[in-house]
Image (cartoon, helix red, strand yellow):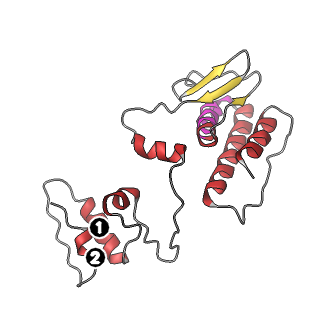
Amino acid sequence: MMNNDIHLLVEKAINGKSNEIFYIDLSKAGEVEQYKYSTAIRLLKSWDKQKVDKKYKSDFECSLRNYLLLMKKEIVIWGYEPSENFEKLGLNMDINLGKIWATLLLPNFVNEYHVKKLYMQEVPEKEVDNIHNLVTNSFIQELTGFAMFKSHEQKLAVMGALKTPNGYTCLVSMSTGGGKSLITYD
């Protein structure tokens, strides 16, 4: 199912033209499509919650922002009254048209690089070794070019070395060919 199809279903559900959360068979869908679908479902569930109890309005607006950024869409919600945090969340609204859109405003403490990669969708899908879960994180992959660790021992050693506080020394003892060179840092 394409972005437009999901978006039309979401907009219909929110504006009362459909009262059901839609279900789609995702058995053959990729990770990106599954994530988009999950984000749409999360949005609709938070919409239903905030209709019953206004204390969930901020949850809905957070879900709405994530959804709009991910789908690269704007949405029309007739008669919606935004919370006081609406603009702080990076949401904007044309009250006359009921149109809502999101901006990628980020506080200074947020790592903008990773957020933009997620929402700008420049992240290629990776094959994941679910049996051993030896996938490196994006920092290590960008630094070294390695997408996978050689072993659980190497993963533990690298993560331990990375978490060593400044001013402290970390000693790693591994067998020959265990992947110690990935740990070395001057």
Q: What label does residue 179 carry, if any? A: 2
Q: Secondary structure at mark 1?
A: helix
Residue 84 coordinates in the image, percent (x, y): 57, 21
Q: Nearer the viewer, residue 63 or 12?
A: 12
Looking at the image, residue 56 lies above or below residue 183: above
Relative side of 157 to 16, left or right: left
Residue 104 coordinates in the image, percent (x, y): 51, 33
Q: Nearer the viewer, residue 19 or 76?
A: 76
Q: What label does residue 158 carry, if any? A: 1
Residue 3 picture quarter: top right
Mark 2 is on which residue type?
Gly
Residue appearing at x 52%, y 57% in the figure: 124
Residue 91 coordinates in the image, percent (x, y): 58, 27
- Extreme residue toward the top, this view: 96
Residue appearing at x 80%, y 31% in the figure: 15
Q: Secondary structure at mark 2?
A: loop
The magenta segment is 54-66
Q: Residues within 10 Å of mark 2 (few under 14, many from 20)?
A: some
Q: Mark 1–mark 2 contact, CB under 8 Å?
A: yes
Residue 93 picture quarter: top right
Mark 1 is on which residue type?
Val
Looking at the image, residue 67 lies above or below residue 178: above
